[in-house]
């Protein structure tokens, strides 16, 4: 039988910790004592890794450190009250109410349910006041579970944290977002028949109906806090009915179309793209970040009512496109451009990996002459026992996947700018880029043009009768015509010339020029370990594989070699000088051997998160050396992924491995030297305990 989520033994009303690491350790120790966490250090490493991704402090003196971990036996919540406050990164200062949430690895539903439920509870001032005034641990645990209600606050019990195994429908905080509030504040996550009934009940003349969408990068706390804040404010505002769709991490349940159709206005409070945003087109809209939904709900409701009174329709305006709102609204155009390009690259990479590896396998099995096998031969006389036939099959399948590289890049750049209406002109522009030999650069430009054209069309205020066909017929038709004209007649040829010049330049690289390019690519691959700069270098390399030349194959080899260095170097460093690393890092080092060998640069992230000022410079130094040596040795590579598993496809394979080994040794030696210079007590590290300075740095960097 699963125990209660929180008991008196998991409550500390006099938490004396001064740092978030100490607070997490103190509360986690209670979980260990109750048998709910099996490895304290391993669990704390998982908590620190999650904390490094994004601060878990919330406005109002709240800290909610949380994680999923293999060291957790059952979903558990521990609570601590710190008289002096602990800094969890909230904008308004330290937290005195601290909730440590632990869920077993893979227990997504339980994890998200606890977090979303707690987030809604924390919008209740009576609930927080009761926690701050509590004098008894058992009473506090009962209050959090919902067994006891704070004074003058019945809703707090409704939002109580559900116990493990409780049916989702019994909690207001289910990931789908269902709320048990009555019609004025009813949540969006309700069956269709209930939401239709709501529309009929609330159709009284004079009622102003609003639909809202809330979402945040993690899809947990702020998503539900914004929903609760908007619902509570609407409930207290005469003549307003508001229904919220929470788009959380575990998915979302769509608002009933009848509810949307009956709405007078829309509020978007989000920091990530609103999914299926076109459902809300043609209505007065306020589009803000999720924190605005929490902090100033009354202003948002008043603003959207004013827009409706003026007859403004802004739901499909270019100022509220998907990627524009994937971050703070103050993002500059440089930041937006990077996000648009990364959107295209992220969707392109699976095509690159699958297609490139299939082509590489075809070459490995049948040799490079497999490209001379005719498709007609493969279709008409496939030989089940012939390696040549199988090699040709792999080659042409990979080539088919690779043919999508530029169209997918262009299509999803446009998607990042203008949401789904950008897909058609984006794909069309990318295909035209291939037709006119504009290649990878043509795809980039075509995607940006397609997105811009769609955004311009969306700006036009069309009659209501045409709004229904705009995203399906009008926008794809007009935008495709414009993109086609520009790519075929205006800019296609100049871009093709530029692409050809770039190809010629890569082919002409030799000597010092090639080495310098190798250094630059190596530094980019190792600076952010899988982040935007890493992806730019990788995209540059795989772009050349669309039309492979000797120069582009050298670039691909240098990029892959440099990308393998950081995790392999960390693995080597933990092997030769394990006492400089924590127990958790030594365990991560074992996995880093495999990750590095497989060209997964992200395998070094746990080490960089723990000690960025030493790990990242050391990784960059080794990556630069490897990139330079790979270019100097003239190594080539036709596969965009695979690590050591595609060594048979590498030109000058022995020298390529030498380049990687040298870079790994350089990085490992540097990180050992830099860590050895720390002024922390080595005895703590020998015993597997982190020194305070090490623990403090562990959670300050991005994972």
Image (cartoon, rainbow, N blue to C red):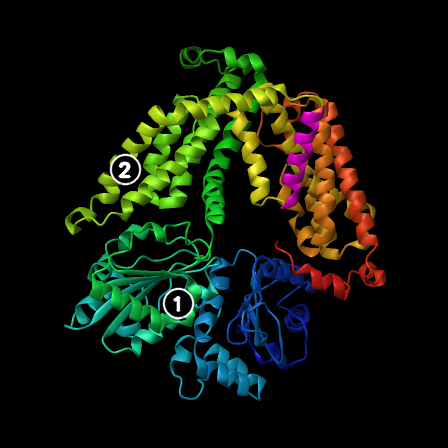
Q: Is residue 13 visible?
A: yes
> x%, y% of residue 104?
57, 60
Tell me, for residue 293, which label it has, or none. 1
Q: CA distance from mark 1 to mark 2?
A: 33 Å
Q: Is residue 205 above or below residue 657?
A: below
In this view of the protein, can residue 173 be seen by the observer? no
Residue depicted at 54% across the width and 30% down the height: 542
Contact between labelled residues 2 and 1, with CB atoms less than 8 Å apart: no
Q: Secondary structure at mark 1?
A: helix
Report the span colored magenta: 512-528
Of residue 327 and residue 185, the one placed in the foreground of this image is 327
The image shows residue 654, relative to residue 19, as above or below, that is above
Q: Count the marks: how many?
A: 2
Label 2: element kind: helix
- Give the side of residue 82 with respect to residue 446, left or right: right
Residue 343 rendering spot, x and y as whole percentages: 46, 43
| Callout 2 crowding tier (Cα within 10 Å): few <14, some 14–19, many ≥20 | many
Q: Local crowd at mark 1 within 10 Å, few (<14), some, or many (≥20)?
A: many
Q: Residue at x 33, y 45 (%)?
A: 455
Q: Quadrant of residue 99?
A: bottom right
Q: Residue at x 35, y 37 (%)?
A: 450
Q: Position of residue 456 (x, y in %)?
A: 30, 44
Residue 514 magenta-highlighted: yes
Percent position of residue 567, x then y:
69, 43
Chain-order first, disc 1 or disc 2: 1
For label 2, the residue is 476
Residue 561, relative to residue 618: is it above or below? above
Residue 33 occupies which quadrant of the picture?
bottom right
Q: Which mark is residue 451?
A: none
């Amino acid at each position: 039988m699963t125990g209660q989520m929180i008991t008196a033994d998991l409550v500390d009303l006099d938490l004396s910790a001064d740092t978030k690491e100490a607070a997490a350790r103190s509360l986690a120790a209670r979980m260990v004592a109750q048998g709910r966490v099996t490895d304290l250090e391993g669990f704390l490493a998982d908590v620190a890794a999650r904390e490094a991704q994004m601060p878990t402090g919330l406005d109002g003196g709240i800290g909610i450190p949380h994680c999923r971990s293999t060291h957790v036996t059952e979903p558990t919540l521990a609570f601590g009250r710190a008289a002096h406050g602990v800094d969890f990164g909230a904008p308004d200062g330290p937290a005195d109410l601290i909730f440590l949430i632990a869920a077993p690895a893979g227990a997504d539903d339980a994890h998200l349910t606890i977090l979303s439920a707690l987030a809604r509870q924390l919008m209740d001032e009576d609930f927080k006041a009761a926690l701050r005034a509590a004098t008894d641990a058992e009473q506090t645990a009962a209050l959090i579970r919902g067994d006891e209600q704070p004074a003058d606050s019945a809703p707090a019990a409704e939002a109580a944290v559900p116990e493990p195994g409780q049916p989702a429908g019994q909690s207001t905080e289910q990931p789908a977002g269902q709320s048990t509030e009555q019609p004025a504040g009813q949540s969006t996550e309700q069956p269709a028949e209930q939401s239709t009934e709501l529309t009929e009940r609330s159709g009284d003349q004079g009622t102003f109906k609003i639909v809202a969408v809330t979402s945040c990068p993690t899809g947990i706390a702020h998503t539900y806090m914004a929903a609760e804040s908007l619902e509570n404010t609407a409930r207290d505002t005469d003549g307003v009915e508001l229904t919220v769709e929470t788009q959380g991490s575990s998915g979302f349940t769509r608002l009933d179309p009848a509810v949307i159709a009956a709405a007078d206005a829309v509020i978007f409070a989000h920091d990530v793209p609103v999914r299926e945003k076109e459902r809300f087109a043609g209505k007065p809209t306020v589009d803000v970040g999720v924190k605005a939904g929490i902090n100033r709900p009354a202003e948002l409701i008043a603003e959207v009512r004013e827009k409706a009174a003026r007859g403004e329709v802004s739901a499909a305006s270019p100022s509220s496109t998907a990627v524009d709102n994937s971050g703070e609204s103050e993002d500059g155009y440089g930041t937006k451009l990077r996000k648009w390009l990364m959107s295209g690259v992220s969707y392109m990479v699976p095509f690159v990996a699958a297609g490139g590896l299939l082509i590489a396998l075809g070459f490995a099995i049948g040799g490079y002459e497999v490209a001379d096998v005719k498709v007609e031969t493969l279709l008409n006389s496939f030989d089940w026992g012939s390696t040549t036939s199988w090699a040709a099959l792999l080659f042409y399948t990979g080539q088919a996947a690779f043919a999508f590289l530029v169209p997918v890049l262009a299509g999803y750049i446009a998607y990042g700018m203008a949401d789904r209406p950008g897909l058609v002109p984006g794909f069309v522009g990318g295909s035209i880029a291939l037709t006119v030999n504009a290649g990878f650069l043509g795809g980039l430009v075509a995607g940006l043009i397609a997105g811009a054209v769609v955004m311009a069309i969306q700006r036009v205020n069309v009659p209501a009768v045409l709004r229904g066909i705009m995203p399906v017929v009008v926008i794809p038709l007009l935008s495709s015509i414009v993109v086609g004209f520009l790519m075929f007649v205006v800019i296609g040829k100049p871009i093709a010339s530029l692409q050809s010049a770039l190809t010629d330049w890569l082919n002409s690289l030799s000597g010092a020029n090639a080495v310098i390019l190798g250094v630059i690519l190596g530094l980019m691959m190792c600076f952010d370990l899988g982040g935007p700069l890493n992806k730019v270098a990788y995209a540059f390399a795989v772009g050349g594989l669309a039309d492979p030349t000797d120069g582009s194959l050298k670039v691909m080899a240098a990029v892959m070699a440099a990308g393998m260095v950081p995790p392999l170097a960390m693995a080597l460093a933990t092997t030769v000088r394990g006492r400089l690393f924590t127990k958790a890092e030594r365990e991560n080092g074992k996995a880093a051997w495999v990750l590095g060998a497989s060209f997964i640069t992200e395998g070094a992230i746990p080490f960089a998160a723990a000690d960025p000022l030493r790990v990242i410079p050391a990784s960059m130094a080794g990556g630069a050396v490897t990139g330079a040596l790979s270019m100097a040795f003239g190594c080539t590579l036709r596969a965009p992924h695979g690590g050591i598993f595609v060594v048979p496809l590498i030109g000058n394979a022995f020298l390529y491995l030498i380049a990687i080994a040298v870079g790994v040794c350089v990085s490992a030696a540097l990180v050992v030297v830099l860590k050895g210079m720390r002024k922390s007590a080595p005895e703590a590290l020998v015993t597997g305990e982190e020194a305070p300075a090490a623990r403090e740095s562990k959670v300050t960097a991005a994972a």
